[in-house]
Image (cartoon, grey):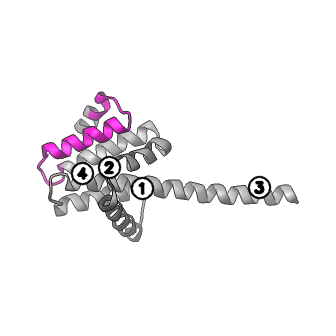
């Protein structure tokens, strides 16, 4: 009886922990994509739409969840002093493949307005470095995004 209750308790907490980790990854990815969108000092409508579409595809979020995540991510980006708080979350939770997928998504956001600024490229390079990704992954992600 006690063992069953403990198993149930751990399963519930494990599920909640997983949901919190998933939300943390969604927020970090959204925040970094918004950073790319505003890196050239102007957030174009195409870039905003790209962020929403990429979040929906990558994380299978509903339109309401997308709205909530993007609003919260925008607030976090505005309050952030550096990229480390977002990349730290990803280094703790994301696999190498998920990090590679994020780099591709960041490139897609940067290219969404058909203009790639040096600021956007610099930001993506900086994030790749903070995620401990080799330069070859940085370049491969750019190629896949094209």
The part of the image, by quadrant, that contains residue 9 is bottom right
Residue span colored magenta? 111-138
Work out whether mark 1 precedes mark 2 in sequence or the reverse, and give the earlier one: 1
- Residue at position x 39%, y 64% in the image: 69
User: Circle 1 is placed at which residue position?
Assistant: 26
At which x and y percent is residue 127? 31, 41
Judged left or right of residue 52, residue 146 is left
- Please rate how many residues cluster around mark 1, counting C-alpha atoms within 10 Å: few if below 14, some from 14 to 19, many from 20: many
- The residue singled out by tag 4 in the image is 36
Q: Earlier in the sequence, mark 1 or mark 4?
A: 1
Q: Is residue 130 covered in magenta?
A: yes
Q: Secondary structure at mark 1?
A: helix
Is label 4 in a helix, a strand or a loop?
helix
Identify which residue, 103 or 73, lies in the foreground.
73
Q: Nearer the viewer's eye, disc 2 or disc 4?
A: 2
| Image position of 103 with respect to 134: above or below | below
**Residue that appears at 44% across and 52% down:** 25
Q: Earlier in the sequence, mark 2 or mark 4?
A: 4
- Marks 3/1 in contact by CB < 8 Å: the verdict is no
Secondary structure at numbered mark 2: loop
- Looking at the picture, how far across and down is residue 87, in whole percent? 39, 45
Report crowding for label 2: few under 14, some 14 to 19, many 20 or more residues within 10 A (C-alpha): few
Residue that label 2 marks: 82
Residue 131 in sight here? yes
- Tag 3 residue: 7
Q: CA distance from mark 1 to mark 4?
A: 15 Å
Q: Report, in whole angstroms, how far the alpha carbon at label 3 lies from the one at label 4.
A: 43 Å
Q: CA distance from mark 2 to mark 4?
A: 13 Å
Question: How many marks on residues?
Answer: 4
Farthest front residue? Answer: 81
């Amino acid at each position: 009886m006690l063992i069953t209750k403990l198993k149930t308790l751990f399963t519930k907490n494990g599920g909640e922990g997983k949901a919190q980790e998933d939300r943390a990854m969604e927020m970090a990815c959204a925040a970094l994509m918004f950073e790319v969108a505003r890196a050239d000092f102007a957030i174009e409508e195409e870039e905003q739409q790209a962020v929403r579409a990429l979040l929906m595809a990558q994380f299978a979020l509903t339109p309401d969840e997308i709205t909530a995540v993007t609003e919260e991510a925008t607030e976090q980006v505005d309050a952030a002093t550096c990229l480390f708080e977002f990349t730290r979350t990803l280094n703790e939770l994301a696999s190498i493949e998920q990090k590679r997928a994020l780099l591709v998504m960041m490139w897609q956001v940067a290219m969404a307005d058909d203009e790639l600024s040096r600021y956007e490229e610099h930001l993506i390079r900086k994030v790749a470095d903070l995620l401990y990704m080799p330069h070859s992954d940085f370049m491969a992600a750019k190629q896949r995004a094209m």
